[in-house]
Image (cartoon, grey):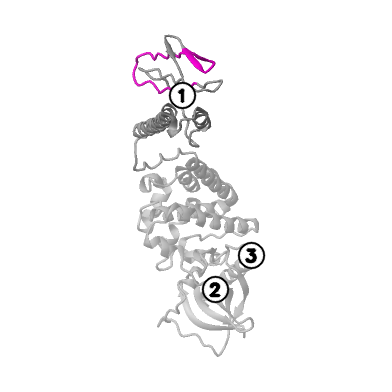
Amino acid sequence: MSTAETALSTAEPPLSTAEPAPSTADAVAGRYELRAVLGRGATGVVYRGRDRVLQRDVAIKILHLEVAGEDATSVRFQKGTRLAARINHPNAVAIFDTGTHEGQPFVVMEYLSGETLAALIAAQPLPCSQVRTIATQLLGALAAAHRRGVIHRDIKPANLLFTSAGALKVVDFGIATGAEGNMVTGPGLVVGTLAYLAPERLQGAPATPQSDIYSAGVVLYEALTGQKPFSADTPATLLDEMSNSSPRDLAPLRPDVDPRLTRVVMRALQTDPKARYATAAAMANALERSRRSNVKKRSSLPAPPPTPTIGASPIEEGSRRHRLRGLRVFMASAVALAAASCVGAFAFYGGGSSHPSQRTSLVATESPSPGVDVVPVVSTTVATTTAPTTTSSSSTTVQTTTRPTSTTAPTTTTSPSTTTGGRTRSKGKRTND
């Protein structure tokens, strides 16, 4: 029986008719009340219990009487429990107490309310990111156990539970060792357990850290593909296939898995223990390197092209800017032309005043409107010369020109004038006051 069955759900399952209901009158060791049966197997029964002293729920595994009667089995069970209690890791189930009740050895463990990895895998293969997280937590717990000299011997999805917060917990550390003889022959446990055993274990070799690593590889392979590395479905054919062939390649079964992750899993499944990772910590390091490489590969990919926006094309934009610039120049020229024409007309016709000094003052102080650049222009056809006549001792000449409107070269002629004694003389024309 695996302690992984201690937390299949938060609901209390009904008691089996083959197992008498636990009595709450006599607590185990005078401290632990038996509330409900969570599961049973070839080696014992697991109960959900209540610690009267600490007022908390616990999981209690009690060996069957027939198993407990075998001295060697009982000794191994108690020894394995004490070794498991030495493991202090967040991903290893905590051992609280152990002892004997009415001749039956028992162990009190942390109660878990989450489901097993077996239940998750049964629904569908898991995403690669989730498998990486599970692998990291599983290998961390195994590394801590191996450093303490504890070999699990029965790593499988049913022995991997999740807490209500989603953290992985490895259960049954060292506890299943007392049932190795029955583990491969118990009803309903043969194929399920054999499928995760390393090939050398089937040949009678002792358990080692590498055999736990092989079992972890099978678990990860199944989590990714929903299948086991060997397809046999009976004990005999499974033993033959494991002894004479290699595991099926994972890549064809799950092409989307990162090849680096695939290589880590397949190396753990090598038939030769020396070809596997030497330690669980080494496998965890390889897994982390594969993760970093995958992240680096994704970050180095070229950025996707920007999403095109609806609007004018660059050519259309350029043409529009060119048209707008031409329009602004044309408007500025038109304003300048209009202003120059008005000023010229004002100067030529005298602005309604007969006094030349007033006319000169008006023209001289006229300025363009702010923000408008007025460019002096030259008429293409007419040169206008204004030579007002006055009795004053001086005269003022105002010249007004306009911008050319054709390719004809402009011609400008200015006739100088002089005033002497109230008489103004011009070349080619004489004017008297």
The answer to whether one can see residue 270 in this image is no
In this picture, residue 242 sits left or right of residue 420: left
In the rendered image, the residue lying farthest to the bottom is 25
Q: Residues within 10 Å of mark 2 (few under 14, many from 20)?
A: many
Please name the residue shown 60% across and 55% down the image.
Answer: 143
Q: Amino acid at mark 1?
A: Pro
User: Residue 317 location in percent, x, y?
Assistant: 37, 35
Q: Nearer the viewer, mark 3 or mark 2?
A: 2
Question: What predominant SS class does the magenta segment belong to?
Answer: loop
In the rendered image, the residue lying farthest to the top is 428
420 magenta-colored: yes
The answer to whether one can see residue 230 in this image is yes
Image position of 409 with respect to 235: above or below: above
Span colored in magenta:
397-425
Which of the two discs, 3 and 1, labels the residue nearer the N terminus? 3
Image position of 253 with respect to 97: above or below: above
Image position of 246 with respect to 352: above or below: below
Q: Which residue is mark 3?
A: 83
Q: Which residue is mark 2?
A: 111
Q: Amino acid at mark 3?
A: Leu
Which of the two discs, 1 and 2, labels the residue nearer the N terminus? 2
Q: Amino acid at mark 2?
A: Tyr
User: Residue 145 location in percent, x, y?
Assistant: 61, 59
Q: Which residue is mark 1?
A: 376
